[in-house]
Image (cartoon, rainbow, N blue to C red):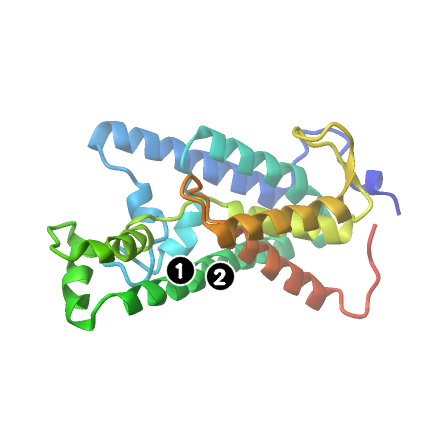
Amino acid sequence: MAFQDYLPRQFNLTPTVVKNLLIINILFFVASIAFEKVAHQDLNNTFGLYFPGSEHFRPFQILTSMFSHGGWAHLAFNMFALWMFGAQLERIWGAKRFLIYFLLTGLGASLLHVGVNWYEAEKMWAQIPVALHESVLVFLNTRGELMIDTSLHGAVRKLDMIYSVPVVGASGAIYGLLMGFGMLFPNVELMLLFFPVPVKAKYFIPLLMIGELYLGVNNFSWDNIAHFAHLGGALFGFIIIKYWTRGSNRFF
């Protein structure tokens, strides 16, 4: 069966779940801009996902962070990928299974991101004397004054990034869609803006994941992207599809 058989006759024929996800994300973003102008508050600080050790963490952020975005470019990239890859997957799986997949990969993204942050936080706390833990925790949650030895500044700065910066965006679930598309359509050639020739999905997706892992492990100071959230979405997507297609060779 050819991949073209799954393409819509007209590009405006977007499947139900993808269409609603597009609408929700766009409305959420527009509402956040309006709220910031009227109330001078950033809704990302409410609906973005904070580290569970932070006093700003709320359980609902696990879901709402998937519909919050940091800017027009962030939103546009994610929504284009949702439409481009998600529409094809929804046509194959149906609305219910696609929505389950999207939400589970988004959850997987949050879990891996939080897990990696927990591991990094534990390493930083180990560098700080136990007697100072309470004072540092108060500083992280209140942004008050903290008098400590300069040798501990690096560890506290890292903890501050973990505790005070929320994660926003549907990127984790989007990477789950990329993984799903690559597994179901491994030989489809993708035209990429940053590469002059078409690349088959079975080559592009692994290279993309290697790049994400490299950036996530190195944690460059100029990079504020949650790479392990991307990898979490892709990993959960891989596991889910392997479970769904066990004993099957349904690839296109």
Residue lying at 69% horizontally and 32% vertically, measured from the top left: 192
Name the kind of residue labelled 1 in the image. Answer: Asn
168 vs 14, left or right, is left
Residue 191 visible in the picture? yes
Residue 127 placement: quadrant: bottom left
Toward the right, the furthest residue is 1
Front residue (pair 31, 137):
137
Can residue 177 be seen by looking at this rendering?
no
- The residue at which mark 2 appears reads as 112
Badge 1 element: helix
Picture layout, residue 17 above or below residue 12:
below
Instruction: Pick out the residue farthest to the bottom.
Output: 130
Q: Residues within 10 Å of mark 1 (few under 14, many from 20)?
A: some
Tell me the quarter of the picture where residue 82 sits. Answer: top right
C-alpha gap between disc 1 and disc 2: 8 Å
Residue 206, percent from left and from top:
69, 51
Position of 27 compared to 240: left or right? left
The kind of residue on which mark 2 rests is Leu
* Nearer to us: label 1 or label 2: 1
Is the residue marked by circle 2 packed among few (<14), some (14-19), or many (20+) residues within 10 Å?
A: many
The location of residue 252, given as percent across then percent down, is 83, 50
Q: Is residue 249 left or right of residue 204?
A: right
The picture places residue 204, in percent across and down from the top left corner, at 71, 44
Q: Nearer the viewer, residue 10 or 130?
A: 130
Q: Position of residue 210 (x, y in %)?
A: 63, 51
Q: Secondary structure at mark 2?
A: helix
Residue pictured at 59% horizontal, 61% vertical? 236
Labelled disc at residue 117: 1
Query: Horizontally, is 238 left or right of 79 in the view?
Result: right
* Count of numbered circles on the image: 2
Mark found first going from the N terminus, 1 or 2: 2
C-beta proximity under 8 Å, tags 1 and 2: no
